[in-house]
Amino acid sequence: MKKYTLALIVIFIFTGWLQSISAQYSFWQPEGESFAIEVSLENTDLKRLPIYRNAVQSLTVTGDHIIVGTSANEGLTPFIYVASLSQRELLSYADLNETVRGQRSIQSDFCRGRNDVLFAGTIANKDKNGTRGDGHLIQINVDSEGGIALRDLGSPVPGEGIFSVTCDADGTTIFGITYPTGMFFTYDIATGQTQVYEDLVPDESQLRTFRNYVQVPDMYLSRALIEDDQGMIYGSTGLNDIFYFNPNDNNFTILDDKLPEVWGRTSLGQVQSWVKSPDGILYGGNFGDGQLFELNPATNRVKNLGKPVLMHQLRGLAFGRDGKLYGVAGGPPGYGHLFSYSKNGEGFHIYGNPQFQMVAPGIEQGIRWRAFNMSRLVSSPDGKYIVIGEDESLSQLLIFAVDME
């Protein structure tokens, strides 16, 4: 009897493992409205971005416009571009090198100032001696037709790039983290005045730990920042710590609760994505182990919600109009996967690797485009559309409408 029971347990565990593995490598195409927007296949004389310069790094939606900032291979330069949800095509693009020379990546997420003006930070290319240049803040204005106007706001910290930014709710101040040192700064949009803080810069002991684990600043600096409903700015710092900055007294607080982790992997903690729910709760994704967590700013307690897929990274989060939290998890050397999380329902639902139909001039018959490496996920302001961006050598946009059933 004991042997029979043990055999049943083994079969049950093995079956569950197979189902989990199957979910990790399945393809998914929604039954409702979905499409891909071609941005970088050079098969036509229409507007297209060149190869190795179109990886989606920054992503947002304003009205009908999807606005994207890209990263490029070392030595090349990035773009800002605008695509239309209704027309399902690329409308316009601007080569950043024509406004700010020598930049490799529009590294940070976009943040929004007044009148839907966007801001982002860059990281520069290396010179012939291997020294990386100054990163810049840039201002992006998009008109009603999708036209782009860029403005260089200069380098807030000379010698440093800009790794992450967020704006306050009033749209008057930019908060950011520099690269590679990890200084925190504030930038007054009206005056251009910058204040720099070194409170979060890793000390020598932390740096030795990072070096022991062969980590670079891309892996331990806070990839994202977010403002809570009380105006506090949250992010992560080395070794799984979470901080918030209080703009009222310019002080930093390290939370007692840390980022969730798999035992023994403390050094891999980094907030890769943030989103705020309508009730003010913050949700974040941890880079090292790809875990979703919840942070209540009223108590500053952190709750680990689990790991949606069997890979590291959780690179984008957004709420849909159905109230579900959508995200993209996983990445190289594996395939990224789309998931949703429902707090009061089914919990995690793993959709698989997205595969959407792409129809464009030159491919009128359509092709099924698979997003293996997904870098960003956002929702439209009304939550109707979820927009996914890739970071491949040829990167496209994938969009689906959220089902209200």
Image (tube, helix red, strand yellow):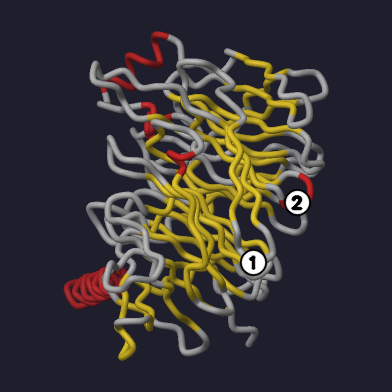
Q: Give x and y (percent) for residue 359.
A: 38, 83
Of all residues, the one furthest to the top in this rendering is 204
Judged by depth in the image, the label closer to the viewer, 2 or 1, is 1
**Residue toward you, 67 or 232:** 67
Residue type highlighted by circle 2: Gly
Q: Label 1, on which residue?
A: 145
| Picture residue at 42% right of the left edge, 54% below the top | 56
- Please, what secondary structure does the residue beneath circle 1 have? loop
**Residue toward you, 57 or 79:** 79
Which comes sooner in the sequence, label 2 or label 1? 1
| Vertical comparison of 339 with 107: above or below | below
Q: In which quadrant will I find the N terminus? A: bottom left
Residue type highlighted by circle 1: Glu
Q: In which quadrant will I find the C terminus? A: bottom right
**Residue toward you, 322 or 400:** 400
The disc placed on residue 79 is none
Q: Give x and y (percent) for residue 13.
A: 27, 69
**Residue toward you, 298 or 102:** 102
Mark 1 residue crowding within 10 angstroms, few (<14) / some (14–19) / many (20+): few
Q: Is residue 228 left or right of residue 402?
A: right
| Picture residue at 34% right of the left edge, 49% below the top | 312
| Vertical comparison of 289 with 137: above or below | below
Mark 2 residue crowding within 10 angstroms, few (<14) / some (14–19) / many (20+): some
- Please, what secondary structure does the residue beneath circle 2 have? loop
| Vertical comparison of 23 with 155: above or below | below
Q: Label 2, on which residue?
A: 280
Q: Is residue 332 left or right of residue 202?
A: left
Q: Give x and y (percent) for residue 38.
A: 38, 71
Say if residue 266 shows up in the picture.
no
| Picture residue at 59% right of the left edge, 68% below the top | 342
